[in-house]
Amino acid sequence: MKSTTRGTLAAVLTCVAAAAGAASATSAAAVGTVPVPVPLDGVEKSLHVELPRVGGEIPLPSPGAPEGPRYAEGRLIPERVIPQLPVAAGLPGLDMRTPLPEVLGDGSNHAGLDVPASDLRALGPGLDLDAPLTAPDPDRFGLPDLRLPQAGVLTPVLQAVPGADVGLGQGR
């Protein structure tokens, strides 16, 4: 095999390996939550008792692109001098099943709670300022008028729709 053929083959294999690594990295990053199991099997076996099954999900926050300053007519300083930073994440989830005594009869010996991870949209606080001068006035030979300076804080925003499911049933 010629050295140029070996070099070309090595370059192709390197590119394929890099593409496969990038594909697996993006698929891992595309997952919105990370599962978190709570291992209680050892305690259950050592104490010979049935313990609750607990697991959760932790969301991965991802920052968004802030909306830049907007220029408005009649203002010397653009609106939203310090823009609000959007962050998309989620509320953590919980999945729990716990044993119940046979108080309610044969049909229900476990209670379950399922709180799925839900989306959370947040906007950080921002700042809006305006100068103590107006835009140039053609009636005053291009000189601006004086006015009171203006400052405002853009309040943070949180939006979420959490939910939960509680139930009784048989089995683990």
Image (tube, helix red, strand yellow):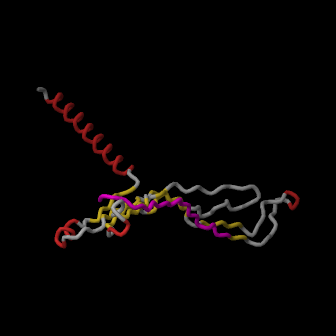
Left-right relation of 125 to 152: left
Residue 98 x, y percent position in the rendering = 33, 66
Q: Residue furthest front?
A: 105
Check residue 114 for magenta coloring: no
Quadrant location, the C terminus: bottom left
Instruction: Give the farthest residue toward the right.
Output: 139
Number of on-image labels: 0
What residue sits 40% from the left and 58% below the top?
A: 60
What is the quadrant of residue 157 in the picture?
A: bottom right
- For the residue pair 111 and 24, the one nearer the viewer reads as 111
Q: In which quarter of the image is residue 155?
A: bottom right
148 in relation to 111, above or below: below
The quarter of the picture where residue 139 lies is: bottom right
Image check: 128 left or right of 53? right
- Position above or below: 123 against 12: below
Q: Is residue 159 magenta?
A: yes
Image quarter of the N terminus:
top left
Could you tell me which residue is drawn at 59 percent across and 56 percent down?
68
Estimate the x, y position of residue 111 in percent, counting from the top left. 37, 64
Q: Nearer the viewer, residue 162 or 111?
A: 111
What residue lies at 69% left-to-right and 70% top-to-bottom?
A: 151
How far from the left and from the top, in percent, is residue 140? 87, 62
Residue at point 72% right, 61% down? 76
Q: What stretch is highlighted in magenta?
A: 152-172
> Observer-nearest residue: 160 or 72?
160
Q: Where is residue 164 in the image (x, y as percent from the top left)?
A: 47, 61
